[in-house]
Image (tube, rainbow, N blue to C red):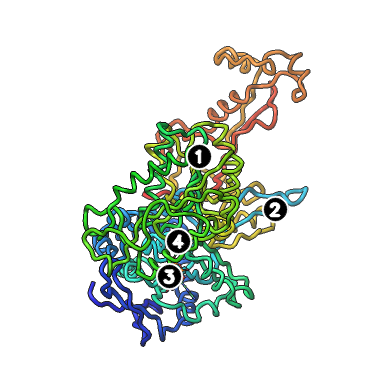
């Protein structure tokens, strides 16, 4: 890429800092790949531009329109993947690692866009939960709605996934209707810049909706208000520092953090060598420490194993680690690349030294590694390292010191209770996995550790082929964890979108609540339809349009006929005395399904028309008995409209 100064994109244009550049070096050979700085950038101006220009433009669109933009971005980025791959090699990432970051990021956009179109209305307000009756007479009701915050989302990202990390936060913010300023971590800012450059080039998003600051955040956080939010990914120490910014506490700025996580993988007591679960466990530990050279937030840092199997696991793991080829990620022979920088490698070495106070190294040498296709002296290469801690419940560091590299610690447990206690000593993690097939042990472990984890993955022979692994945070599921991992924010799927919105209880008459939410509810305005709704096309119907059918009497002969015809001779329909003796009925009642079938006979218009098919019924209930001699009719009301494109 040459010697590039990574620019900043604020106020609708690219700008270069006026000094203070920091060199970013290749993780592979140490040459300067880029220079990064944000000196002289008008941070307060960027926030104002987002609030005044980006916010209103996004809020004028519906959820579906915003989701369409996210999908179009995914399609656009799909076209320029190769360039992103090429750049990423210098961060130390292999082609496989790039797949997680680049293709993973694009897939996340697709997933958010598709879920939003399925689960959110084509409207600007989202409804949450049912209508709540608040008065006896039904003239005063309430309902929760979500509307977008009218501020800015400031996204501070970690270095390990410059593409995925940016896109997984961008998608929910845009779909929610909130403009964002994204700040990549310096060591991989040039990859994030290449992605952002494509976002700008695509011209998909309205002016002010996305901005990019490479380098320091300056005084950005000092200008935040209660309508803004910060979404941080990185270390616990940085998170604490940023959260302590006075404006954040003072203005109750929403602050989500995804931070260090000492994730555990537990081998269940039944998973003996030769069982598929034993093998799957060893493979997963290996995959986790070598993918992205262990620089993953979900990496298995603690491999928790039954005491009597510890030597077997160690042997199997060491044997496989012997086949790992460390080196230049551009080489096809290489299976593990470099850490992002020599600084990061030195940091990991330091952390390993700390861990060695509680554990001993059983594989790898932190000061030396054989390197293929590069020079060990100028690149940020490190051997995979396995430590072994004999008494994990008696020490502290193995549960709190995160060596953010290819490092894991083996630890034994004696009973399921101990395995649970060890996993929970992480004080809150993103993910834990359990490998075993014995339902009793696995269930006990899952229930024992769930409240300390954002995600618990159970791997066994039944899901072995399709399971996506310890580190597969996908858009529909929770990504985030409690305690040390950040606080348990739920960022998966549509819940992630709601994070950028305010939930408000709207109270008023049924008519008013319906007009705010865009959904018809009992007591709201009804517009009498002159024509049968089956004659009308989708665009000719409006919410509240209502049609009443003629009525029909239900007779005893109908009930008898239905019972004979269908074989449903339940006593409440056929035996007067038994029906009377039941707590619900005064005598024989018509079948619920008979009433439903008669209803269809009343409302269906048989001629060819715009109605194509009956997709089924949601929330069907039989709340009132219909007795022979009663008369029924049907009311059809358009409750909501959900256009689907195409
Ligand atoms: P980091 O050093 O904490 O940096 C994270 C981000 O904060 C970077 O963008 C960094 O920018 C910025 N930053 C640092 N100091 C700042 C300050 N004083 N003011 C404003 N911004 C500041 O973390 P990292 O080294 O990039 O990432 C590794 C860590 O991230 C690991 O601990 C890992 O566990 C964690 N992580 C967690 C998750 C998760 O989902 N839980 C995911 C990925 C990574 P600069 O680079 O410009 O300093």
Q: Which residue is mark 2?
A: 141
Using a 10 Å C-alpha cutoff, classify the residue at mark 1 as few (fewer than 14 neighbours), some (14 to 19) or many (20 or more). some
* Residue at x-position 49% and y-position 60%: 402
Q: Nearer the viewer, mark 2 or mark 1?
A: 2
Give the percent coordinates (x, y) of residue 500.
53, 63
Give the percent coordinates (x, y) of residue 599.
57, 30
From the viewer's perspective, tell me whether residue 105 is left or right of residue 62. Answer: left
Q: Which residue is mark 1?
A: 532
Question: CA–CA distance between discs 2 and 1?
Answer: 30 Å
Q: Which residue is mark 4?
A: 352
- Is label 2's Cβ within 8 Å of ligand 1? no
Question: CA–CA distance between discs 2 and 4?
Answer: 60 Å
* Residue at x-position 52% and y-position 31%: 438
Q: Nearer the viewer, mark 2 or mark 3?
A: 3
**What SS does tag 4 mark?**
helix
Which of marks 4 and 1 precedes in the sequence? 4
Question: CA–CA distance between discs 1 and 3?
Answer: 52 Å
């Amino acid at each position: 890429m040459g010697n590039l100064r990574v620019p900043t994109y604020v106020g609708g244009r690219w700008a270069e800092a006026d000094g203070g550049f920091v060199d970013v070096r290749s993780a592979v050979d140490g040459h300067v790949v880029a220079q990064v700085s944000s000196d002289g950038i008008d941070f307060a101006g960027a926030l104002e531009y987002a609030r005044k220009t980006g916010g209103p433009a996004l809020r004028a669109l519906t959820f579906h329109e915003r989701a369409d933009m996210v999908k179009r971005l995914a399609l656009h980025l799909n076209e320029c993947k190769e360039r992103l791959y090429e750049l990423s090699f210098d961060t130390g990432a292999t082609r496989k690692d790039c797949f997680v970051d680049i293709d993973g990021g694009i897939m996340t956009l697709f997933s958010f866009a598709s879920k939003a179109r399925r689960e959110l209305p084509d409207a600007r307000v989202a409804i949450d939960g049912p209508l709540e009756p608040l008065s006896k007479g039904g003239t005063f009701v309430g309902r929760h709605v979500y509307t977008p915050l009218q501020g800015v989302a400031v996204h501070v990202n970690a270095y390990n996934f410059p593409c995925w990390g940016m896109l997984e936060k961008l998608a929910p913010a845009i779909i929610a209707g909130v403009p964002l300023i994204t700040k990549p971590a310096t060591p991989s800012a040039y990859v994030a810049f290449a992605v952002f450059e494509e976002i700008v080039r695509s011209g998909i998003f309205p002016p002010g909706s996305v901005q990019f600051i490479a380098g320091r955040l300056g005084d950005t956080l000092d200008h935040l208000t209660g309508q803004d939010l910060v979404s941080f990914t990185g270390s616990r120490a940085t998170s604490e520092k940023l959260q302590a910014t006075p404006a954040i506490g003072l203005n109750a700025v929403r602050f989500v953090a995804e931070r260090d996580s000492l994730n555990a993988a537990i081998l269940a007591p039944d998973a003996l060598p030769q069982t598929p679960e034993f093998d799957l466990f060893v493979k997963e530990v290996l995959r986790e420490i070598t993918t992205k050279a262990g620089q993953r937030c979900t990496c298995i840092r603690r491999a928790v194993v039954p005491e009597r199997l510890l030597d077997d696991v160690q042997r199997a793991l060491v044997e496989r680690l012997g086949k790992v080829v460390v080196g230049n990620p551009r080489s096809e022979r290489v299976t593990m690349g470099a850490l992002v920088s020599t600084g990061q490698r030195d940091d990991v070495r330091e952390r390993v030294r700390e861990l060695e106070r509680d554990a001993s190294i059983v594989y790898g040498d932190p000061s030396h590694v054989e390197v293929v296709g590069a020079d060990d002296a100028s690149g940020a290469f490190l051997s995979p390292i396995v430590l072994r801690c004999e008494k994990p419940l008696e020490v502290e560091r193995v549960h709190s010191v995160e060596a953010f590299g290819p490092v894991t610690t083996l630890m034994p447990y004696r009973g399921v209770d101990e395995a649970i206690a060890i996993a929970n000593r992480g004080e809150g993690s993103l993910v834990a996995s359990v490998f075993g097939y014995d339902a009793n042990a696995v269930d006990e472990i899952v229930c024992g550790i769930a409240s300390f984890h954002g995600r618990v993955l159970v791997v066994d022979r039944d899901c072995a082929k399709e399971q996506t692994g310890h580190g597969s945070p996908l858009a529909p599921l929770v990504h985030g964890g409690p305690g040390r991992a950040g606080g348990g924010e739920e960022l998966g799927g549509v819940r992630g979108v709601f994070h950028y919105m305010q939930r408000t209880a709207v109270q008023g008459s049924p008519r008013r609540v319906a007009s705010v939410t865009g959904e018809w509810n009992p007591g709201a305005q009804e517009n009498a339809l002159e024509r049968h709704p089956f004659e009308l096309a989708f665009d000719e119907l409006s919410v509240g349009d209502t049609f009443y059918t003629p009525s029909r009497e239900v007779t005893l002969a109908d009930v008898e006929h239905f019972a004979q015809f269908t074989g449903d001779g339940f006593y409440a329909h056929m035996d007067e005395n038994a029906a009377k003796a039941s707590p619900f009925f005064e005598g024989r009642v018509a079948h619920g399904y008979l009433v439903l079938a008669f209803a269809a006979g009343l409302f269906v218009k048989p001629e060819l028309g715009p109605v194509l098919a009956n997709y089924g019924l949601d929330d069907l209930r039989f709340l009132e008995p219909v007795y022979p001699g009663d008369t029924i009719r049907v009311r059809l009301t358009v409750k909501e409209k959900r256009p689907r494109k195409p």
